[in-house]
Image: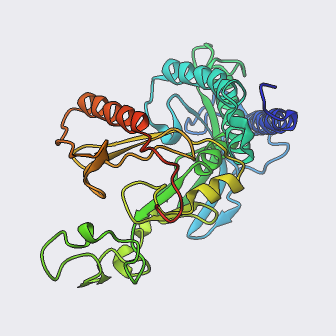
Amino acid sequence: MNGVPVNRAVVFFVVAAIVLAGDLASKSLVFRDLGYPGTDREPVVRGQHAVFAAPPESSGSSVAYLNGWVTFRLFTSFNRGALWGVGQGYTWLFAALSGAAVVGIPTWLFGFRAARSWWLTVALSLILGGTLGNLYDRIGLPQCIDENGGTVLAVRDFLLFTFGAFHWPVFNFADVSLVTGAGMLVVHTRESHAPDLSDCPPAKRLRGAPQMRIGDPGPMGRILVRGEPGNAIVAACAPLPGEIVIDKPGKGMFYATNVGDLLQARGDTRFAKILLRQNVGSHLTPTLGHLDIEIGNVRGQFQVDGKLSTPRRQNNPIDLISRMQQVATALTQSGAAKPASRSGT
């Protein structure tokens, strides 16, 4: 399969199918048994209440299964937007985006051979399964009807949690799969240096005001030093268990880090990344044995054919990309482009 092991395709489609089947079965069961929608006193469809207990004279809602500061119940509702109710009324737009994802994900995995990564294969299978589950609802296949007898074009949600006075947006198992798959693709990076500053270039160390440079004592520990309180990721963005955290001594996540080992351990043999930082720096990374271009901030200058080239500040992203291409071409032609290593040499 275009250089991709067959077992990747088997796992991808089986996981996506399991997610899709579980999502559709759970929606059908809950909506049929409880009725809908749960927010109307006179529901369009009354529930059978053969499976889930419900409060007297109530349709669309089950009894509370957790009833403390955290509560949980089944509560049928329709979402005509995206996750967390964003973009209400744009069902057609999210259906179109979902359709594009259904085509694009397998194409990327198997057409462009990204499926050689087990981690990426599983993550995108969860995303595909969740996407298909919600797309099924958005195009009206469940045949739910509204108060006028028309077909409801909206996602069926039914899992409701509250935390004190806060009501978490109602969701479904397709959403759980989507968020899980997306979370598997998260990589956290933070700029930091070893306590002995052995990975900090002298020119970078000398930047800034005296007594406030990298490694100097600050109000939250030594400045930009790994392990110090001030170098920790803020609690609101703290990595979840299993998420990758890359400590990098520069702006690029490949220079003098173990990211290559981590990606290869997960089966990733290629990694494409273009990151633009306006007025700061940029990196062009076609592969793991990559051409690493860092403009301005860490190394400051390139030496191409014996000449120092200091890129001027670029405010226009198009100009910045053009400059990157020029530097990449010059480095490649001069033989100066070398695969990156963990030591940064």
Query: What residue occupies the far left of the structure in this picture?
Result: 209
Tell me the residue at 44%/36% (across/down): 86
Tell me the residue at 51%/45% (across/down): 290
| Left or right for 220, reference 56 | left
Above or below, comparing residue 289 to residue 113 in the picture = below
| Left or right for 325, reference 143 | left
Q: Is residue 106 visible?
A: yes
Q: Position of residue 236 (x, y in %)?
A: 42, 64
Q: Is residue 35 visible?
A: no
Q: Position of residue 178 (x, y in %)?
A: 63, 42
Quarter of the image for residue 106 reads: top right
Q: How many marks?
A: 0
Which is nearer the eye, 281 or 102? Answer: 281
Tell me the residue at 30%/58% (across/down): 298
Which is nearer the eye, 307 or 198? Answer: 307
Colour setup of the view: rainbow
Q: Position of residue 226 (x, y in %)?
A: 42, 77
| Left or right for 21, reference 237 | right
Q: Position of residue 244 (x, y in %)?
A: 57, 60
Above or below, comparing residue 221 to residue 202 in the picture = below
Which is nearer the eye, 216 or 231? Answer: 216
Tell me the residue at 79%/33% (across/down): 4
Above or below, comparing residue 250 to residue 76 in the picture = below
Quarter of the image for residue 122 reads: top right
| Left or right for 261, reference 53 | left
User: Which quarter of the figure is the N terminus placed in?
Assistant: top right
Which is nearer the eye, 253 or 296? Answer: 296
